[in-house]
Image (cartoon, helix red, strand yellow):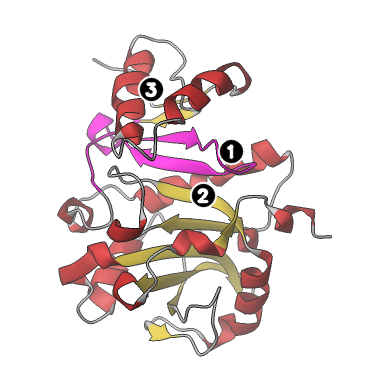
């Protein structure tokens, strides 16, 4: 069956339905998967609005597609979720040579974050985070797309010129944690997989990906070069929850 590759629908009429579906999210670790597979995709295939998702993209085929879903927590937080079954950061499918680049899709979802805020954001104000296997509430991969915490943004703005293409522990803390960090020169993440960069760039990470959290935060480097700061943290040392670097209230959006 051939269907359209990308559709966007308003959210206003489905807020109550979203709240109902998400009530049991913490009790049911497959709640997100059920929302995608039993609601969003079937509605889309029937030519209907893909409720309760805001957007669905199958440009590369359904098996490589994803949805963008408004999390009920936070003023603007979006979740980018694969249509295929992918458990989380530990899933070996994410490291396959032809794996879909969900980070690129998530970066595109910043448009929906901005839509909920009714204003545009500089790239430095947007973060994408994936929590570790042991610090998440759902067992379907989902990338949190939200505003960067103000203090985190300030620290990274001062620190970014120390970064290069190698992973190194930061000498300063972000929310009490010394993350591993590296620079990535990329406009939109479409040309590289952050999952693979973590697996191949930090000793031992590939064999225990489930213990790691991974975050991509927009950046502009010297010479007005667009890119990202990649951050990773290990649950075995007490971290693993990169979502802590985001701000559900999006205070950074009000900074003049």
Residue sitting at x 74%, y 43%? 119
Image coordinates of residue 32 in percent, x first then y, are: 35, 34
Q: Is residue 59 visible?
A: no
In this view, the mark in front (1 or 2): 2
> Under tag 2, what secondary structure?
strand
Asked if residue 230 is positioned above or below residue 256 in the image, the reply reads below
In the image, 20 versus 86, the foreground residue is: 20
> Under tag 3, what secondary structure?
helix
Q: Is residue 237 visible?
A: yes
Residue sitting at x 66%, y 37%? 116
Residue 40: mark = 3
| Mark sitting earlier along the chain (2/3) | 3
Q: State yes or no: discs 2 and 3 in contact (Cβ < 8 Å).
A: no
Q: Find disc 2 in the rendering and name its residue.
A: 145
Assess whether residue 235 is covered by the magenta stretch.
Answer: no
Image coordinates of residue 176 in percent, x first then y, are: 53, 78
Residue sitting at x 71%, y 47%? 120
Q: Find disc 1 in the rendering and name its residue.
A: 112
Q: Which quadrant would residue 84 be assigned to in this image? A: top left
Q: Which quadrant would residue 81 be assigned to in this image? A: top left
Residue 69: mark = none
Neighbor class of circle 3 (other Cα within 10 Å; few <14, some 14-19, many 20+) is many
Assess whether residue 79 is covered by the magenta stretch.
Answer: yes
In this view, the mark in front (3 or 1): 3
Q: What's the CA distance linking mark 2 and mark 3? A: 19 Å
Span of residues in magenta: 58-87
Neighbor class of circle 1 (other Cα within 10 Å; few <14, some 14-19, many 20+) is many
């Amino acid at each position: 069956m051939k269907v359209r590759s990308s559709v966007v629908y308003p959210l206003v009429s489905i807020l109550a339905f979203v709240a109902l579906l998400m009530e049991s999210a913490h009790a049911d670790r497959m709640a997100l998967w059920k929302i995608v597979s039993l609601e969003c995709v079937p509605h889309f295939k029937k030519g209907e609005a893909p409720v309760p998702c805001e957007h669905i993209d199958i440009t590369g085929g359904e098996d490589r597609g994803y949805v963008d879903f408004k999390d009920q927590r936070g003023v603007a937080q979006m979740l980018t979720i694969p249509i295929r079954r992918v458990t989380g950061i530990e899933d070996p499918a994410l490291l396959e040579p032809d794996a879909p680049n969900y980070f690129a899709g998530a970066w595109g979802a910043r448009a929906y974050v901005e839509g909920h805020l009714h204003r545009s954001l500089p790239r430095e104000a947007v973060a994408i985070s994936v929590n570790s296997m042991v610090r998440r509430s759902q067992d379907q991969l989902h990338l949190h797309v939200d505003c960067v915490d103000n203090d985190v943004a300030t620290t990274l703005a001062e620190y970014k010129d120390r970064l290069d293409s190698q992973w190194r522990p930061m000498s300063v803390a972000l929310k009490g944690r010394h993350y591993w960090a590296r620079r990535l020169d990329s406009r939109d993440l479409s040309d590289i997989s952050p999952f693979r960069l973590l697996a191949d760039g930090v000793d031992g990470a590939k064999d225990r990906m489930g213990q790691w959290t991974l975050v991509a935060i927009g950046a502009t480097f010297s010479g007005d070069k667009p890119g990202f700061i990649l951050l990773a943290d290990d649950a075995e040392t007490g971290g693993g929850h990169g979502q802590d670097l985001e701000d559900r209230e999006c205070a950074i959006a009000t900074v003049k």
